Amino acid sequence: MPMLNDLTCLNDRAILTLSGPDRKNFLQGLITNDMGKLSSAAVIYAALLTPQGKYLHDFFICEKNETLYLDGERSRIADLFRRLMMYKLRADVSLVDASEDYTVMASPEPLVEGLVSYADPRHSHLGYRTIMAARPANQQSGQQPDQQINAYDDLRLSLGLPAGSRDFDVDKTLILEGNMAELGAVDFNKGCYVGQEVTARMKYRATLKKRLLPIDVDGPLPARGTIITNEGGKKIGDLRSGQGGRAMGYFRLADMEFDQKYHCGEAQVSPWKPDWYPKSE
């Protein structure tokens, strides 16, 4: 199984900071994971949902010197900031868009020169994430930032991991359909949070009918949203993010089988089980 081997600048990520005495309680009532798990030595992966349990944002949260750092999608960080501000009300929290103040790096080992460096909680083969006030001087040479992102994205796809709004349809995809429970972003024992009732009901009372799954692509990579069909021409899913011969697809589970080939544009695609996939299914 591939692992992260190179220092990579994740320039598609950005940082929000939260400070103030209510910072943890404020997030505890909003996000899918338990803020009680957070410490100077532990980071959490979590999501913000609609009241109907649909995906809005996912992010990493770490803490340093009584400040919380939220690592989210750069292209949507302003929307995350706006949504958190809507919930702020009278909470004693200072929320800052620090997009231009920090760089997020990925590396095989912790970066001691970083503000905070932690193991990626989704998968051990993704190495470490580090929040830095500036890009390190020893960043690998010979590769442009876009090439680094492409290599990191290829690793992410080879592990079968979704990438935020590139794979989730915002305000449409249910959190458990995106494998967030398997990737450690959901705590089913914590108290209430936005979307908690729907999420818990799906976990304990319903059978999951759709999932984001990794696929191998044989042929030219189709555009996001291209439908996936079986031999009879029936739609069984659609394509999400991809690169080269790897991608993610959104499937109706009753209509597909792992390691079978299906049609998608001019290509054939085959869904497969990643190592984190629940054995019960």
Image: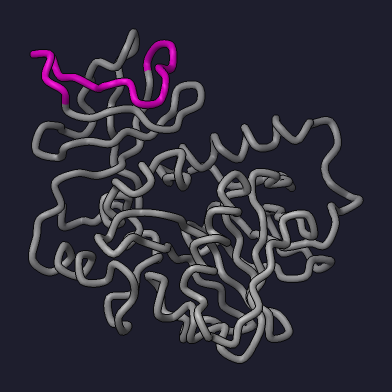
Q: Does residue 130 lie above or below 217 as drawn?
A: below
125 or 248, which is in the foreground? 248
Q: Residue at x 40, y 40 (%)?
A: 167
Q: Quadrant of residue 144?
A: top right
In the displayed structure, 25 sits above or below 254; it is below
Judge whether 137 appears above or below 33 on screen: above
The magenta segment: 218-235
Front residue of 99/113: it is 99
Count all numbered tags in the image, as a single digit: 0
Please indicate whether residue 191 sits to the left or right of residue 56 in the image.
Answer: left
- Give the image quarter of residue 99: bottom right
The front one of 7 and 25 is: 25
| Residue 252, x across and y down, in percent | 16, 37
Q: Is residue 26 above or below residue 142?
A: below
Side (left or right) of 266 relative to 153: left
Residue at point 56% right, 48% down? 76
Which residue is at a point 79% across and 66% down the rendered structure image?
A: 114
Picture coordinates of residue 150, whole percent (x, y) = 62, 32
| Image x and y of residue 188, in percent | 27, 75
Residue farthest toward the bottom in the current orientation of the protein:
21
Tell me which secondary structure the magenta stretch mostly adopts. loop
Residue at (91%, 51%) from the top-left corner?
A: 137
Identify the colour scheme used. one colour
